[in-house]
Amino acid sequence: MFADPADRMMADALETILGGRRESGLDSIGRQAMWHDLARGGWLAFFDSALSDTDGANPVAALLGGEVLGRNLAPLQVLIGAGFVAPLLRRLPPSSPVRTIVSDWMSDGHAVAIARPVIAETARPGTAGEGSYTSAAALHARLHGRQYVLDGNVTEVIISDARHAILPIGLPGGGVGVAAVDLAAQGISQHLVNTVVEQVRCGELQLLGATVPEEAVCVEDVSDAIHLAGLTWSLLLDAYAVGVCRALIARSVEYAQMRVQFGRPIGEFQAVQHMAANMQVAAETSASLSLAAMREFIDAPETSFELIAASRLHSAASAQWTSELAIQMHGGVGFTWELGVHEWYRQAMFARHFLTDNRGLRSRLASIIRLRAAPAADGTMTARMLEAIHE
Amino acid sequence: MSADGASELRRGFRAWLDEKLPAEWRFTSHGATDAAVREMRVGIGERLGRAGWLSLAWPERHGGGGRPTSDRIIVVEELVRAGAPEPMNANALGIFAPTLMRFGTPEQCSTHLPAMLSHESLWCQGFSEPDAGSDLAAIRTRGAIFNDEIVITGQKVWTSYAHLSDYCYLLVRTEADAEAHRGLSLVIVPMRQPQVRVHPLRNIAGTDEFCEVFFDGAVAPIDNLVGERGDGWKQAMFALGQERSVGLAQRSLRLTGEFGRLARRCEAEARRGNPDASDELFRGALVDAYVTSRAVEATVRRALEIDGAGGDLSAIAPVAKLAWSEGHQRQSALALDVLGPGAVLGIADNETWWTTSLFSRAETIYGGTSEIQRNLLARSLGLARGMGRRVR
């Protein structure tokens, strides 16, 4: 990968802001401060711009920046803001006040909750399917004076520290709008559960006659915007996963150079060396595929789903496998909390299973592979092809 | 090159292939007999070479087109798409030709490169020996220098197509007393002499192209030394570096093309009612193979970009080799799984798939075994034998 000096400086600057402050070492206030620094420092806009069709498009910078987030286990709210909310807001109708309302929340340092974005079912812009961000749009909005009244349940919401949310609204004529919601508003109840990542809580929101100002709801169909934001979200998750892999390789190599058994550093043993090599294979293939997917997204977003899906599956698996190898390389202290290896593993598990729609992506890819492999629709073609194969 | 220029090149080469590549040469297996190999692999090599497609990215001073590496990749992509056989001299053109351009004399280049391109002369690589496989520096084949001749004595093995070759680029030990990595030299040896005996070895796939070669006082003129005497290790490492970049790109792009054929075959089998091809587990495995093929392709393209910019390949070239070779083995095994019991029968084109699967076992061995690649990666990460002093 060619990172020009400006890209490197950008990555260094982001590294400085994060300063090795990993999420586990921060309480809610600390996480809020990290988020605040990034939001106020224009980093959400940076990622949004790097993965866009503007002059600022720069897949290498996006990958490097995402890696820095992953290396430092940046809080999930950063990923949500940079990877999903900012790209969604930019694609909302310019006249919609929702853009300003949510941007102001984030600029003021407030995290924003979202329903779990799923790209598989929104692969075709304008269509909403079961299980996607948009299908969570079980919310109904009706105008009452100068307010909208919201009713319904939204499942699989990622909340963590958020006090606000941007939620999908089912539109009467089909399509999906969005509503900017203050979670403390009357008529909203949260049913949250713990997750494998200690600091992250997810769950269901129940809205029963919750009211929001009229301007906080966009009732135009924004399915396409949600679809594209889902793709950038997926790409940033990939870069984050690469960062997780790279951080684990660095930590594991350092440990293998220092830990002595049988009179020598364990890194001298080939069995240990080859675990590190396997981690490197996972990291580099993921970085390569992520970069290819980012380029494809910037060049041709309408046809980029296939590569983005492949990259998401590969990067998610790589981060989890690399974490498992890191635990093994660290031996006993990899299993305990002493050196913090567990945090990477838990994050990788969460990203692979909750933030990635494995079943949906695999199912879509299987369909695409079949579709492409199928002969022309007329039966004669099929017969001729089979004849050629079996004659 | 502009996007328009790239499209034009692609269109032009595609049209050329439509005209020059016979249908019976497309999507064939490796060629079981010498006659078949000669006809297909020498035939396509000769046509491509004479038309300048194989030297598109060579410097103009060596008779090449002076075009960027990206153009060469377009040619490779179209060869893969058309199912063309690999040119017979692909190994020499990919590995030895750049080495000769870098270290050889102008006379050596002008003598050998045109004939290598046109396939008037066929070439083999003489590196591995029975006791020097992964440990290449342990080679013992002796190159004794007497006046203006080098007299070669020893044995090489895994020398592909030695029995058909006119020349061998051979790594020999010219300085008997020097340490392992020193005292090696690279020399061009004519194969058509009585002091060179070639015994084809039958490989796992049943073909005979891997050979063992005995040199019993074979002679090469001193002018055939490539580069400085005793500098052969540096040249061999340069040559193997070529193997790990552009040569690998050709094979990895074939992996993606081969996946497409596997998917089509799988779909056809499913429509024919083969329950194995319709099995959901295999469908899932097909997705895994697809993801792997895309990851390999992306990695190799990135390695080429780094290489083209003069960057360091040490951390990524072994990744590309490992991901491709191990991915191809899994994909080949999967192909047999989805074809069901008929996979190993001589029906349809199943022989192509089982032959591919059998050949794929060599891919984690040649060009640096998987173990060597992992050692290289570990070293690039800072883990190596003897890195820490013994503590007790």
Image (tube, coloured by chain):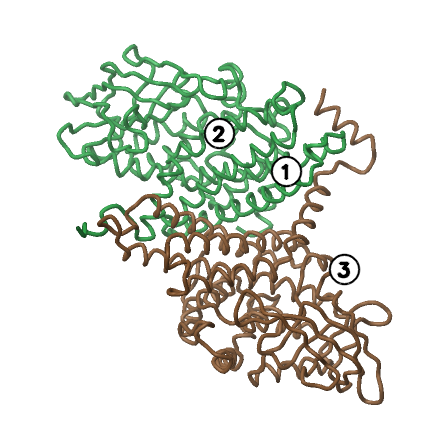
Chain colours: A brown, B green
Q: Chain of mark 1?
A: B
Q: Are marks 3 and 2 on the same chain?
A: no
Disc 2 residue type (three-letter): Gly
Q: Chain of mark 3?
A: A
Determine the secondary structure under disc 1.
helix
**Marks 1/3: CA–CA distance:** 28 Å
In the image, residue A364 lies at what x, y percent? 69, 50
Q: Residues within 10 Å of mark 2 (few under 14, many from 20)?
A: many
Q: Are marks 1 and 3 on the same chain?
A: no
Q: Are marks 1 and 3 in contact (CB under 8 Å)?
A: no
Looking at the picture, tell me which residue is in the foreground, B181 or A154.
Answer: A154
Looking at the picture, tell me which residue is in the foreground, B120 or A384.
Answer: A384
* Horizontal side of residue B134 vs A377, given as left or right: left
Q: Which residue corresponds to mark 2?
A: B49
Q: Name the quadrant containing residue B254.
A: top right
Q: Chain of mark 2?
A: B
Q: Residue shown at 71%/36% (left/top)?
A: B278
In the depicted structure, whether residue B185 falls above or below residue B9 = above
Q: Name the quadrant containing residue A86.
A: bottom right
Q: Residue furthest top?
A: B194
In the image, residue A351 lies at what x, y percent? 56, 61
Q: Residue shown at 51%/15% (left/top)?
A: B33
Q: Are marks 3 and 2 in contact (CB under 8 Å)?
A: no
Question: Tag 2 or tag 1, which sits nearer the N-term?
Answer: 2
1 or 2: mark nearer the eye: 1
Looking at the picture, tell me which residue is in the foreground, B300 or B338.
Answer: B338
Looking at the picture, tell me which residue is in the foreground, A140 or B237.
Answer: A140
* The disc label shown at residue B160, or none: none
* Horizontal side of residue B152 vs A58, given as left or right: left
1 or 3: mark nearer the eye: 3
Q: Which residue corresponds to mark 3?
A: A129
In the image, residue A240 lies at what x, y percent? 51, 63
